[in-house]
Amino acid sequence: MSNEQLVVKHPGTGRATWAMDSLFEHLLEPGQSERLGVALVTQPSGVATPLHRHAHEAEAFYVLEGRLDYQAGDDIHELDAGAFIHLPRGLPHAFRIRGETPARFLALTAPAGLLQLYDEVGIPAAERRLPGPDGQTLEVEIPKWIEVGPRYGLEVVGPPIPE
């Protein structure tokens, strides 16, 4: 039997996590949907992921504000507000936030479980803003990614997009 639920979230009412120097506002989580996970993500300029792939999930992103360079396979795409990208399961990808302002985007995963990874490596957000000194340092967070990521089928396969 499915655990799909009707979910309505108003601004500022979902759980929030600080991870990757970023704010993840959980809109649709495992336990509410098995098939889809959704988060509103705010990330400061300069944040970048290593080239990686997911063994279990497809991902999609819809950019609301800001600019990202997104590598999907061998191609790099410049994504501005209004852009959408879908990444099939297993496709190597990476991104870097560009410009002077933070980027905000909807992050979608199918199935839903991947967003729990951010809870394990991050910390509960004290407020709905980017973390400051009250956040977690990357020196503390990166070893958590190395330990926890493989349980979620996350495999790092290369370096980040250059600055």
Image (spheres, helix red, strand yellow):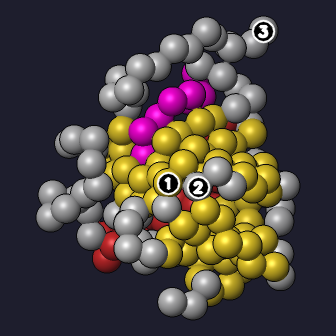
The prevailing secondary structure element of the residues shown in magenta is strand
Question: What is the three-letter code of the residue carrying label 1?
Answer: Glu
Q: Position of residue 42 (x, y in %)?
A: 42, 53
CB under 8 Å between callouts 2 and 1?
yes
Instruction: Residue type at mark 3: give it.
Output: Met
Q: Which residue is mark 3?
A: 1
**Residue that label 1 marks:** 65
In this view of the protein, can residue 49 be seen by the observer?
A: no
- Name which quarter of the figure residue 71 lies in: bottom right
Kindly give the residue lying farthest to the bottom in the view shown.
162
Q: Is residue 119 above or below residue 2?
A: below
Q: Check disc 2 and give the amino acid type.
A: Ala
At label 2, counting other C-alpha atoms closer than 10 Å, the crowd grade (few under 14, some 14-19, many 20 or more) is: some
Mark with earlier residue (1, 3): 3
Q: What percent of the width, then of the height, locates residue 19? A: 39, 57
Q: Does residue 6 appear in the picture of this structure?
A: yes
User: The magenta stretch spans which residues?
Assistant: 24-31
Does the CB distance between marks 1 and 3 fall below 8 Å? no
